[in-house]
Amino acid sequence: MKEREVTCYYCEDIFLSSGPGAKFCSKRCKKKVEWQKHRDQRNASDNPMKPHGGNHTGKVGRDHYAYKDGIGLFSMRLSRGYKTHVRYCERCSKDLAEALPQFWCVHHVDHDRTHNTYENFELLCKRCHQIEHECWKAFG
């Protein structure tokens, strides 16, 4: 095939092409156009996959498909605030101020995870929470 002069689709430099469908002078220019297309599709206002606050639907709260009676709201916001406010395990008085999340939990006194009021919360260390729910019975 005969080489011909072609203008690069991205950088507009002139290059010699031996193929009929050549649009780019280099792989780098081609990748830049692909990434730009990807960004444009992601940010299009009519695109249902456009990111909105961490989910792909643009719906939050009760309208979001994963909403279950405010349980997510509790674990994301209320439990951390309650731990900061109380600080100590309400059964054994262990200091939980510097404890990592896997070593404490906010227990619902009435065992109803949808009843998210501060009167229904109890800050417990992991040990006391396991005692409350009698977790040892599952192993014996």
Image (spheres, helix red, strand yellow):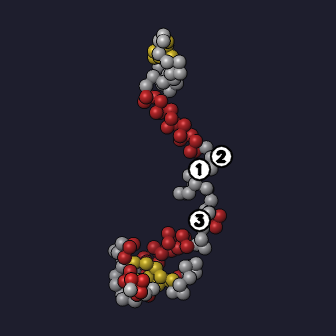
**Does residue 88 appear in the picture of this structure?**
no
Q: Is mark 3 on a helix, strand or loop?
A: loop
Picture coordinates of residue 114, whole percent (x, y): 58, 78
Q: Which label is found at residue 49?
A: 1
Which residue is identified by label 3? Answer: 66
Which residue is located at x 38 percent, y 86 percent? 140
Q: In this view, does 20 lie above or below 127?
A: above
> Relative to 51, does residue 8 appear above or below in the rendering?
above
Q: Quote the CA–CA distance across marks 3 and 2.
A: 22 Å
Residue at image position (48%, 10%) is 2
Residue type, numbered disc 2: Asp
Q: Which of 25 and 80 is in front in this view?
A: 25
In the image, 135 versus 7, the foreground residue is: 135
Q: What residue type is labelled 3?
A: Ala
Residue 85 lies, in percent from the top left, at: 44, 79
Distance, label 1 to label 2, CA atoms, is: 9 Å
Q: Residue furthest top?
A: 2
Residue type beneath disc 1? Met
In the displayed structure, 76 sits above or below 39; it is: below
Q: Earlier in the sequence, mark 1 or mark 3?
A: 1
Query: Disc 3 or disc 2, which is closer to the eye?
Result: 3
